[in-house]
Image (spheres, rainbow, N blue to C red):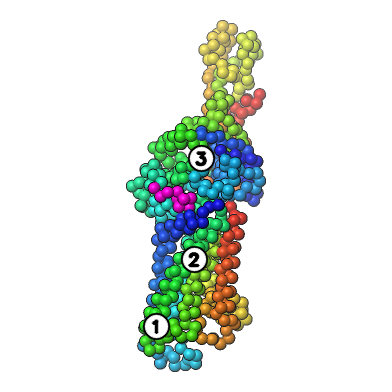
Amino acid sequence: MASFPAVLRSEWTKIRSVRSTVWTLALAFVVTVGIGALLSLLTNNNFTEFRRNEQSPFDATGTAFAGIMLGELAIIVFGVLAIGNEYSSGMIRVTLAAVPQRTTLLGGKATVLGGLALAVSLVTAFVTFFVGQALLGSHSTSLGEPHVLRAVFGAALYLTMLCLFSAGVTTMLHNQTLALGVLVPFFFLLSPILSAVPKVKTLAHYFPDYAGSRMLLVYEQHGQPYGPWAGFLICLAWTAAALAGGALVLKKRDA
Amino acid sequence: MIELHELTKRYGKTLAVDRLSFTVPRGVVTGFLGPNGAGKSTTMRMILDLDRPTGGRVTIDGKRYEQLSEPLKYIGALLEAKAVHPGRTARDHLLWLAQSNRIPERRVDEVLALVGLTPVGRKRARGFSLGMGQRLGIASALLGDPEIVMFDEPVNGLDPEGILWIRNLMKRLAGEGRTVFVSSHLMSEMAVTADHLVVIGRGRLLADMPMPEFIRRNSRSAVRLRTPEPERLLDVLAGAGLRHEAGPDGSYEVVDGDLARLGELAAANGLVLHELSPQQASLEEAFMQMTADSVEYHAGDGPGRDAAGAPGTWGAGWQADGARHTAAARQEEN
Ligand SMILES: Nc1ncnc2c1ncn2[C@@H]1O[C@H](COP(=O)(O)OP(=O)(O)OP(=O)(O)O)[C@@H](O)[C@H]1O
Ligand SMILES: [Mg+2]
């Protein structure tokens, strides 16, 4: 068997030595923090106007995380690129010749990818939260308030799981362009549209993004199908399924 | 030592490799020869367990590839030259490869120097020429200081200097006692580098023998005679105890005959000759004949046949003077 620590070191070198992967991660941080900061600032300055017809309590955490949709896009692209660039360059054959134990290989890739995504997501989530609260001024909340800490950690886990989900799907499709072409429209068109359509909505509520984003909610929302922890488990199940599917395809298929 | 046993690969309807059995001998350069589409690359991918065989098996030093824990230390391969992320530097490419098999990092700089890429080691592979890409591929193959190296058409697209460099490298590797397994679709290339030859066509084994034996068996020379009095010629040849074969257009050929002696024999018998000429079949022709039935894409077969790819230069050359070869093949059978 290939040595797992050796696979980890090797995969880490792969990730850090290519600009595109590094950039997408940096972008995930910048857009999530930046948009959150911008919206927090605007909200603070126009608070009465923004809240005129609102019944629900003001969600200071949610306001800070207003940019997570775009951060999500960047981290999905990161997950796709980190796996997919091996297929587009034909390097996957070099990799598999060096590490023929394919499940070990994918395990190593997912560990490095997931570890890095989690680290970046945690930093992103906390920086986003604190910057947002600082700009919300008197309307801000704190980590000590009920569910807030869970929501901030939830944001980090959500981004990490979407990254690994995308990595798994890319392994299944073994094609970078195809993976982007499937995942981006799915998360940014299909899923949001379907969650708004009356009957199909119930189905769309079990998609990984809707489920995972439940972890970010601080207040009960009306018509909520399940709570944050159920959402976490559903999203985790999708991630595990995508990676397992990827492992299966990688193992079965000619490289 | 690489051993193939009844190795078979089918892609849908295409039988790419067909019950192939041979052994790549230790410590020499073995040429793996076959026309385009013969199944060379497929065989090599199966040796590395990249493509899974439909049937049969292949072992390296008695083990399946997957059982090798750090395979780069046993066998190094160059399959495609540009199988490198364009945005990664040559050095980083070799570094991750080394780390995956616990090869010390200093070896990266050693192989970079060995292939002459030290000056561009920190440049991204995007800007590399074909020759540089090939050198980087060879550097990755040599990284683990392996006993066996395998190259798939390493001279493809290289300039004469690059070709010479690879040729010498392979000889040097074999000189160090390593097993070199190299594919090509050019007989002439193999004739100058290989000690042993394996020829395949349409996925099937056509020849597996030491190079000198292949040359001896296949480089045929003959003297061709043409005369208006064929019966008398045959009598004269029989009288001199010379065996003959029928040549094209009513001519006769004496295999391994001596030109001067045959001329003198004709003169002594007052025999009118319209032709007295030496015939030499090159190794290239021998290879073409051997694989003629198994060439996948003949040039000019009309649309459709070559849908899977451009016909190789080799096929085109063969078809151009196909008539001559076919005649030669027929006469060989007589
Ligand atoms: N992945 C694949 N899917 C389908 N068919 C394939 C695949 N790989 C190879 N083939 C087919 O298998 C046959 C053998 O191809 P292969 O590439 O092994 O030949 P080759 O001897 O390397 O040829 P060349 O000299 O052109 O490189 C061809 O008919 C090819 O079209
Ligand atoms: Mg080939």
Say if mark 1 contacts mark 2, CB within 8 Å: no
Give residue A161's position: percent from left, percent from top: 52, 70
Q: How far apart are marks 1 and 3 (CA)?
A: 62 Å
Residue, disc 2: A114
Q: Which chain carries label 1?
A: A
Residue, disc 3: B148
Vertical comparison of A67 with B235: above or below: below
Please name the amino acid that badge 3 sits on: Ile
Task: Please report the residue visible at 59 percent of the width from the left and 81 percent of the height from the top.
Answer: A226
Vertical comparison of A150 with B194: above or below: below
Mark 1 or mark 2: name the one nearer the start of the chain: 2
* Residue lying farthest to the top in this orientation: B268
Task: Please report the residue visible at 43 percent of the width from the left and 45 percent of the height from the top.
Answer: B139
Give residue B234's position: percent from left, percent from top: 64, 13
**Tag 2 secondary structure:** helix
**Tag 3 secondary structure:** strand
Q: Distance between the residues labelled 1 and 2?
A: 28 Å
Please name the amino acid that badge 2 sits on: Gly
Q: Which chain carries label 2?
A: A
Task: Please report the residue visible at 36 percent of the width from the left and 49 percent of the height from the top.
Answer: B121
User: Quarter-wise, where is residue B160 in the image?
Assistant: top left
